[in-house]
Amino acid sequence: MAKLFEPITIKDVTLKNRIVVSPMSQYSAIDGFANDWHFVHLGSRAVGGAGLIITEATAISPEGRISPDDLGIWKNEHIANLKHITSFIASQQCVAGVQLAHAGRKGSTFAPQRGHGEIAIGAGGWQTFAPSPLAYSDLYPHPLQLDRDGIQKVITDFTHAAERAMRAGFGVIEIHAAHGYLLHQFLSPLSNQRNDEYGGSLENRMRLLLEVIASVRTVWPESRPLFVRLSGSDWAGGGLDLEDAVQIAATLKNKGVDVVDITTGGLVSHQKIPVGPGYQLPFASNIKKRTGITTGTVGLITEAVQAETILANGDADMVMIARELLRDPYFPLKAAHQLHHDVTWPNQYARAKPT
């Protein structure tokens, strides 16, 4: 059996294969509501044979959005449309996951198709918040430093969002603590210059993430997997590096996190990333081997043999694919054929299955 198509069981959830649709922002929602675009986008990847589909960064509050066009889960009215999507995903023997996110200082910005940089408050933007009052760049909003009440609101908003996710039919939650968004901002000394219990040492900088996890677990059943998207490096001097990421991942494992989804970058505008096929794999591989936590890897994974080799070598437990699945929603079905592994095609498409 190809490792890529070997099932994996995490808590009470079994994925039929190790191919995960990585969160990809669509910037197509109005007031946070999922719509036909999201149904077709996510549903087609379920038809295409993925084992797990994780929604784009889904805002836990209006001020937690990246742009006005972000998907949201900050109010009960969002649940019905999301439930429509998760029900279809489940009908394809696929698991639906949701990435819960707060953009922090990277919020109140234009969706890529609409512009770049800050949306002023008077033009439809909003006040952003961060661990410290440091902007991402000159083109981004200047955030206010979160006070204790603001921190508690973030924890509460994540918790309420997790409860809604359960009601919406998601089988997996991923907490976004990477790509320069709020929880990542707290983790990195480049964006967190606080002198209270949420700043300074790595232990203190992890505090908010751990408090979010503990609170989410009060409403998210122990039987359902909890993922965290974590940065292996800020790619900038003085920022998070692999040793920090190993320590954070080990702590997360001890605090009940089931899977870490390892990515890198996005925290500062002056980062220097050596982009290339599989460029983030060494971070995932190191974290998996040194902590023993179940690990996903991302980053320009585009070929079936490449994905199979990653798993066969024990460098990760699952592959999280984004751009290739934008280009080809049926990548998993084609990968199975290329790896000489027989998988069941949807009945409606069975006549097209290669022999």
Image (tube, rainbow, N blue to C red):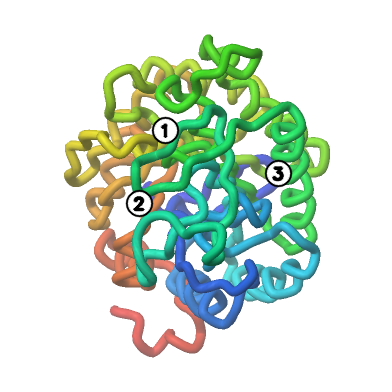
Q: Earlier in the sequence, mark 1 or mark 2?
A: 2
Which callout, 3 or 1, points at the residue further toward the start of the chain?
3
**104 lies left or right of 173:** left
Question: Which residue matches tag 2?
Answer: 2
Above or below, comparing residue 121 to residue 255 in the picture: below
Residue placed farthest to the top in the image?
201
Residue 351 position in % (x across, y down): 39, 89
Q: Determine whether label 3 and label 1 are within 8 Å by CB.
A: no
Disc number for residue 158 = 3
Numbered disc 1: secondary structure: strand
Q: In terms of depth relative to the viewer, which is nearer, 126 or 237? A: 126
Q: Residues within 10 Å of mark 3 (few under 14, many from 20)?
A: many
Residue ID at (38%, 51%): 4
What residue is drawn where x is 27% and y is 51%?
301
Residue 197 in the image: above or below residue 35: above
Q: Nearer the viewer, mark 3 or mark 2?
A: 3
Q: Is residue 54 visible?
A: no
201 sits left or right of 139 in the view? right
Considering the numbered disc 2 on the image, is that residue within a helix, a strand or a loop? loop
Q: Mark 1 points at which residue?
A: 231
Quadrant where the C terminus lies?
bottom left
Whether tag 3 and tag 2 are in contact, CB under 8 A, the answer is no
Considering only order in the chain, which callout, 2 or 3, is on the residue closer to the N terminus? 2
Q: Can residue 112 be seen in this view?
A: yes
Amino acid carrying mark 2 in the image: Ala
Q: How far apart are marks 3 and 2 (CA)?
A: 37 Å
> Eyeballing the image, is 20 above or below 271?
below
User: What is the three-letter code of the residue carrying label 3?
Assistant: Phe
